[in-house]
Image (tube, coloured by chain):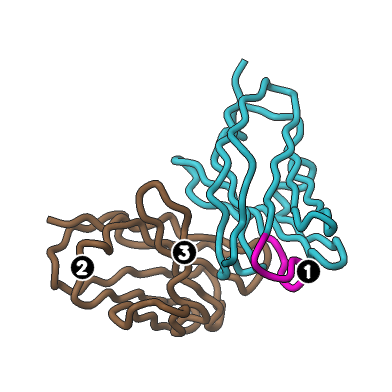
Amino acid sequence: QVQLQQSGAELAKPGSSVKISCKASGYTFTSYYISWIKQTTGQGLEYIGYINTGSGGTNYNEKFKGKATLTVDKSSSTAFMQLSSLTPDDSAVYYCARGHTMGMGWGQGVMVTVSS
Amino acid sequence: DTVMTQSPASMSTSVGERVTVNCKASQSVGTVVAWFQQKPGQSPKRLIYLATNRHTGVPDRFTGSGFGRDFTLTISNVEAEDLAVYYCLQYDSIPYTFGAGTKLELK
């Protein structure tokens, strides 16, 4: 059974960073890209970018360059997204999804709250 | 960036009715459009890809249509389980962009 299991909720202070994970199971990890998506009540769904899980190559939405850094650890079939220099505007639910078009299953989402 | 203007923002319908959700792209995206369903408390799930193709396991009461700039998701014979927010997505060019969503409520 294909699963994307994301890490738990994060409470972070402004200016800090968080790194959230997305562990894949039930399929060959390197056969599908992993995409990352931000969901807020105000802005809806925003595409952050994707990572080629085989090569590590990335493609970012310009808006998230410098904010999000996508990496993978093939040995553990896990994708990561680090969010840096956090502000309250980064408070959101962050999803990983299988495939660059997000059609092959999503993780359960991680709520990130940025507050002092 | 390609803006996806989705309408209506919300709609109320009854079981057994037919509803349509529309998305208009700010520039042509060919057929590179998908539709997602997000039920309360759940992650989004893809219903339609390449404008007209149902994802595996999606009931045939969900139909996608359109080309170029105008796209439609039609739900025929609405069921209670269809209560959700529906989003369109263009993946023709980076950044991929979503519509703002349509909330389907049942009367």
Q: Secondary structure at mark 2?
A: loop
| Residue B78 at x, y percent in the picture | 20, 70
Residue A30 magenta-highlighted: yes
Point out residue B79 in the picture as x, y percentages from the top left corner: 20, 68
Looking at the rendered structure, the secondary structure element under dot 1 is: helix
Circle nearer the N terminus (2, 3): 3
**Placement of the N terminus of chain A among the 4 image quadrants:** bottom right
Q: Are marks 1 and 2 on the same chain?
A: no
**Residue that mark 2 sits on:** B79
Image point 73% across, 46% down: which residue?
A: A81
For disc 3, the chain is: B
Q: Which residues are magenta?
A: A25-34
Asked if the magenta segment contains residue B53, the reply would be no
Indicate the chain on which mark 2 is placed: B
User: Label 1: which residue?
Assistant: A30
Q: Quadrant of residue B97?
A: bottom right
Left/right of residue B61 with respect to residue A19 in the rendered view: left
Query: In the image, is residue B17 above or below residue A88?
Result: below
Chain A, colour shown: cyan
User: From the viewer's perspective, is the residue at label 1 or at label 3 nearer?
Assistant: 1
Say what secondary structure mark 3 lies in.
strand
Letter of the brown chain: B
Assess disc 2: are there few (<14), some (14-19) or many (≥20) residues with their C-alpha within 10 Å of its C-alpha.
some
Which residue is denoted by mark 3 in the rendering? B45
